Image: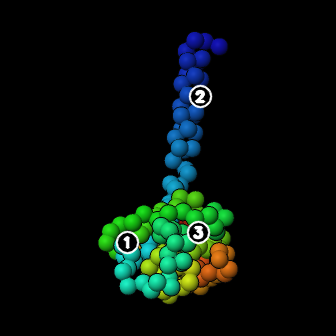
Amino acid sequence: MTSRATHVMVVVAVTLASVGCDEELTSPSPSMGVRIIFVGSTTRRTNLAASAQDCINAVGVTHIHPSWRSFAAVPLQAVPPDRYEITFDDVPRGTPVSFRINDQNWCDENPTGAVTRNVFANDVRLIQNATTPGNGEEPGYALTVTASGSITQ
């Protein structure tokens, strides 16, 4: 084989390899997170009854218990004055998941502080439609995230 033919084959091989690499870098879809928002005051209400004190102490900081993380408590980020939020990049796609949010200000509506309204996932208002393990069965939310990041209930 001549030097020129060898050179042409090397150029072709490098070109094909780089095209393959380019396709591999662009083919995976970007990670799409699921943003959970709870609309509620970020300061504790002053009108909670003394009987709610045990619940308030048990709740601590406003947090979420996601099923895909074995319902472990994860603190929500306060966005004063009236919102908490968190974005998860690890929510399974195409399979039902559930979660619960606990907030001190809900201790007069639920003895565990479980939130039953004002919750959104990727800007979709959720309805309380599930129970989750906690202090007994606690109200929560069930949803499915599609491959494109849409939310279904």
Q: Which residue is mark 3?
A: 65
Quadrant that contains the N terminus: top right
- Badge 1 density bin: few <14, some 14–19, many ≥20, Cα 10 Å: some
The image position of residue 144, as x and y in percent, is: 60, 74
What amino acid type should be assigned to the residue bearing mark 1?
Thr
The image position of residue 132, as x and y in percent, is: 64, 77
Disc with the residue nearer the chain's start (3 vs 2)? 2
- Badge 2 density bin: few <14, some 14–19, many ≥20, Cα 10 Å: few
Residue lying at 54% horizontally and 77% vertically, measured from the top left: 54
Q: CA distance from mark 1 to mark 3?
A: 18 Å
Looking at this view, name the residue that lies furthest to the left: 81
Residue lying at 42% horizontally and 84% vertically, measured from the top left: 48
Q: Is residue 125 left or right of residue 12?
A: left
Q: Which residue is mark 1?
A: 42
What amino acid type should be assigned to the residue bearing mark 3?
His
Q: Which residue is mark 2?
A: 13
